[in-house]
Amino acid sequence: MTTRASGRNPSSNHTAETASAPVRLQKFLASAGAASRRKCEELILEGRVTVDGKVCSELGITVDSKSQIIRLDGERVKPEAKRIYVLNKPPGYVCTNNDPTGRPLAVNLIPDDQRRLFSVGRLDEASEGLLLITNDGDLANKLAHPRYSVTRRYQVQVVGNPTQETLKQLTKGLRFGDGFFRAKGVKKIRSQGKSTYIEIELTEGHNRELRRLLARVGHKVIHLKRVTFGPVKLGRLGIGKSRQLRPPELNALNELVAAPGEKPPSRRRQSRKRLTTEDTRGNSQVSRGRRNATGKSSTRKGSVAKASTTRKSTAKKTTARKTTVKKTTVKKSKGRKQRG
């Protein structure tokens, strides 16, 4: 089984970009358009990649494409010019390069038969709109990763008329079995009959995230369309049509994920980080509560100590008065005896 869409020629000798220094094998494969970074790691572990005729089944190996021959499933992999397309995906198409049930593939809508291509993130089969298609696995991995928080905007038609309080629930977030989902922003556009049009922004791409969020608050999705991905806009691109990314758009995307030498964390690590952050916030609130309680306690202790000091001072004064009275009485008694 291969990871390429049918009709693609992986051994094309099209314009090449030679590597200037040794890089990790999975990064080279991804940048050459073999697959996404994560999928390339799987290909290596499965023993489907060879370097100079030897099978490499471990991650972490570095290669130099200038002096070494890298093959995937027996076919030589060469660096190739990066391509990234904007596609207006129609409903009914899937964002995968191999569908066992034979459903139509979104990548096959791109008029580029000489390169391996794959989608950046996913749009579910029933959804339509902006989908980025590329042969640059490294860029695709970064753009889809939650660390970089690339904003996607959607126009959604839902059943019913959600209240403002309901829409606020989407931005506060809801917990599901596979994670905590939250919209970055929500805006009601208009109501029409028994349905409402809203605009929603997300920064992550969980499986059917929008549909699940809206279903949880009681509003089934009728129609869902993605209209932006970061700085890239769908505009008037016809459904099923595509275009290459313009240089300013590509530069803007690269700026969003610019972090030289930094590897994005896994989704599992990202989830742990988010949970840790939530725990830290909770602990901070507890700590503030403790500090407040400690402050009040200290105030009470100070008041008690002050009262105790006051009582001691009063007792001393009383004792002094008693001593003075006693001395005066003794003197008077002595005076009477002398006169007698």
Image: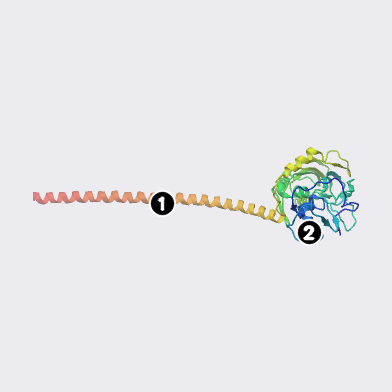
* Amino acid type, callout 1: Val
Determine the residue positioned at 79% across, 39% down: 249
Residue 266 as seen in the image, left or right of residue 306? right
Q: Which mark is residue 236?
A: none
Secondary structure of the residue carrying tag 1 is: helix
Q: Earlier in the sequence, mark 1 or mark 2?
A: 2
Q: CA distance from mark 1 to mark 2?
A: 72 Å
Task: Pinpoint residue 221: horizontal percent, then vertical percent.
Answer: 81, 49
Task: Pinpoint residue 47: horizontal percent, then vertical percent.
Answer: 80, 62
Task: Pinpoint residue 166: horizontal percent, then vertical percent.
Answer: 73, 47
- Mark 1 Cα within 10 Å, few/some/many (few <14, many 20+)? few
Closer to us: 243 or 211? 243
Residue 6 as seen in the image, left or right of residue 300? right
Closer to us: 219 or 179? 179
* Amino acid type, callout 2: Ile
**To which residue does mark 2 refer?**
44
Q: Residue furthest front?
A: 67
**To which residue does mark 1 refer?**
304
In the image, which is nearer the foreground, mark 1 or mark 2?
2
In the figure, residue 150 lies in which quadrant? Answer: top right
Q: Residue furthest left?
A: 340
Task: Pinpoint residue 35: horizontal percent, then vertical percent.
Answer: 81, 53
Closer to us: 73 or 263? 73
Note whether residue 30 is visible: yes
